């Protein structure tokens, strides 16, 4: 529809509004479809079994349109928009879950560290079927998330469907103020371990503080840095760029390409970096998405870091948040572009393959594959991978030997890599790429 098209839909005296369209409309098919919407709106408003408010119908129509596009486009009403703004500041009320919608159920991408969801044992890939006895089926993602929020210290019960479990699991959680410590730090003797759990407004400052503390505590004994991005669902693009820039001295960090050639943007690093020449390992897994993949891809392409773990989630699409009526009517969260790494790799539905594929456990199926992998490519209506994108990694898989027990084998392996103690004897040839 061109810019000269004027469409006005309003309710007058309980009837559906008239649709006014100028003669300069894009085509008769557009006009017919808009008339169809007006007819349905009027029929539902007048004849549905219960009275339905105009706003409820319009919001449902908007949600239906956006949900049909891809898993990440959505409408945020005024309350949800306000909640989103609060969450990006690093503090909000809730359970601490990053979720998406799949087959009418809420699917967990990752629980956030230290939150009620993480403490209750909620796992990536879990499906939430009910909340306080109310079925999720039929609700939009925004409605489901809204039900999981509530007063601090109030409780709710969710029913979880988990692969491998014969029966649904009922889990009772207590809502809390989620203060997301985006960056956490500790020392592993002569290695600095830095965990980034999400990318919010606090991330860049948190990283700088962690690096300063590592320098002060380890000093000249520093052998390297482990940057842990596992189960990090992403967040703010500018923070992902800042984290990448902190470890790069020059070159492109990420580019975005939209529908039109003029929509492309490139983001480059600036001169100067934190801990120059200090070896760096980045840990990723299936829960590493979006901003996490930008960082891992940039550091991998520039050969600044060795990426270890399992293939990342593959959320390589850009969502632009567009306030409506200045935010009074909420906002549109619309997919507008795709992310590309410095070498031109599309992240969408392919993810980042690690340089060394390391599994946490010794278990695998008969084909040597990773079981139950959660990824963007498995979500309904996901955007296709870019043609010519990177093919899945095929190579040796490092796993613990049978009978060996580790609290965190991937981290243990990363520490050994930094100390020059690679355990290549544990590598098991993979017949096919992991899924």
Image (spheres, rainbow, N blue to C red):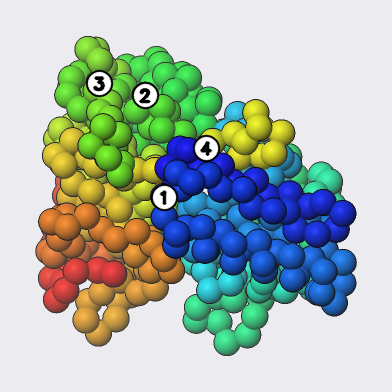
How far apart marks 1 and 3 lie (CA) works out to 43 Å
How far apart marks 4 and 1 lie (CA) works out to 26 Å
Question: Does residue 238 appear in the picture of this structure?
Answer: yes
How far apart marks 3 and 2 lie (CA) works out to 8 Å
How far apart marks 2 and 4 lie (CA) works out to 20 Å
Q: Secondary structure at mark 1?
A: loop
Residue hosting label 1: 26
Q: In the picture, residue 106 is in which quadrant?
A: bottom right
Residue hosting label 3: 269
How far apart marks 1 and 2 lie (CA) works out to 43 Å
Between 308 and 126, the one nearer to me in the picture:
126
In the displayed structure, 26 sits above or below 267; it is below
Residue hosting label 4: 321
What percent of the width, then of the height, locates residue 31?
Answer: 51, 58
| Callout 4–callout 1 Cβ contact below 8 Å | no
Mark positioned earlier in the residue sequence (1 or 3): 1
| Callout 2–callout 4 Cβ contact below 8 Å | no
Q: Is residue 235 left or right of residue 328?
A: left
Q: Secondary structure at mark 2?
A: helix
In the displayed structure, 347 sits above or below 191; it is below
Residue hosting label 2: 242
Mark positioned earlier in the residue sequence (3 or 4): 3
Mark 1 or 2: the one toward you: 1
Mark positioned earlier in the residue sequence (3 or 2): 2
Mark positioned earlier in the residue sequence (1 or 2): 1
What percent of the width, then of the height, locates residue 290?
Answer: 39, 45
Between 378 and 37, the one nearer to me in the picture:
37
Which numbered tag is attached to residue 318? none
């Amino acid at each position: 529809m061109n810019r000269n098209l004027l469409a006005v839909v309003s309710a007058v005296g309980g009837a559906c509004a008239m649709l006014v369209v100028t003669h300069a409309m894009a085509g008769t098919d557009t006009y017919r479809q808009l008339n169809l919407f007006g007819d349905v709106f009027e029929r539902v408003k007048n004849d549905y079994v219960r009275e339905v408010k105009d706003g409820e119908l319009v919001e449902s129509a908007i949600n239906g349109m956006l949900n049909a596009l891809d898993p990440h486009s959505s409408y945020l009403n005024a309350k949800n928009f306000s909640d989103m703004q609060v969450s990006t500041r690093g503090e909000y009320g809730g359970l601490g879950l990053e979720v998406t919608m799949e087959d009418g159920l809420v699917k967990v991408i990752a629980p956030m560290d230290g939150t009620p969801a993480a403490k209750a044992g909620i796992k990536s890939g879990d499906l939430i079927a009910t909340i306080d006895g109310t079925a999720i089926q039929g609700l939009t993602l925004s409605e489901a998330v809204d039900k999981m929020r509530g007063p601090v210290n109030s409780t709710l019960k969710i029913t979880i469907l988990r692969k491998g479990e014969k029966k649904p699991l009922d889990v009772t959680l207590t809502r809390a103020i989620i203060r997301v410590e985006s960056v956490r730090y500790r020392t592993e003797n002569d290695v600095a371990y830095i965990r980034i759990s999400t990318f919010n407004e606090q991330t860049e400052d948190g990283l700088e503080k962690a690096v300063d503390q590592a320098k002060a505590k380890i000093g000249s004994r520093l052998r390297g840095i482990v940057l842990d991005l596992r189960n990090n669902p992403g967040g703010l693009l500018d923070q992902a760029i800042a984290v990448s820039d902190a470890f790069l001295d020059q070159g492109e960090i990420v580019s975005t390409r939209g529908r039109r050639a003029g929509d492309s943007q490139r983001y480059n690093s600036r001169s100067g970096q934190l801990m120059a020449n200090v070896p760096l390992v980045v840990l990723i897994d299936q829960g590493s998405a979006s901003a996490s993949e930008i960082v891992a891809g940039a550091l991998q392409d520039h050969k600044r870091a060795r990426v270890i773990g399992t293939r990342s989630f593959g959320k390589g699409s850009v969502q632009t948040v567009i306030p409506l009526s200045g935010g009074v009517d909420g906002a549109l969260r619309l997919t507008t572009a795709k992310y590309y790494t410095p070498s031109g790799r599309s992240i969408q539905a392919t993810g980042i393959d690690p340089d060394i594929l390391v599994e946490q456990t010794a278990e695998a199926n008969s084909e040597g594959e990773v079981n139950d992998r959660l990824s963007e490519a498995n979500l309904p209506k996901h955007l296709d991978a870019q043609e010519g994108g990177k093919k899945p990694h095929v190579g040796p898989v490092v796993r613990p030997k049978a009978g060996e027990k580790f609290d965190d084998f991937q981290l243990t392996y990363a520490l050994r890599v930094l100390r020059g103690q690679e355990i290549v004897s544990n590598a098991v040839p993979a017949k096919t790429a992991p899924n």
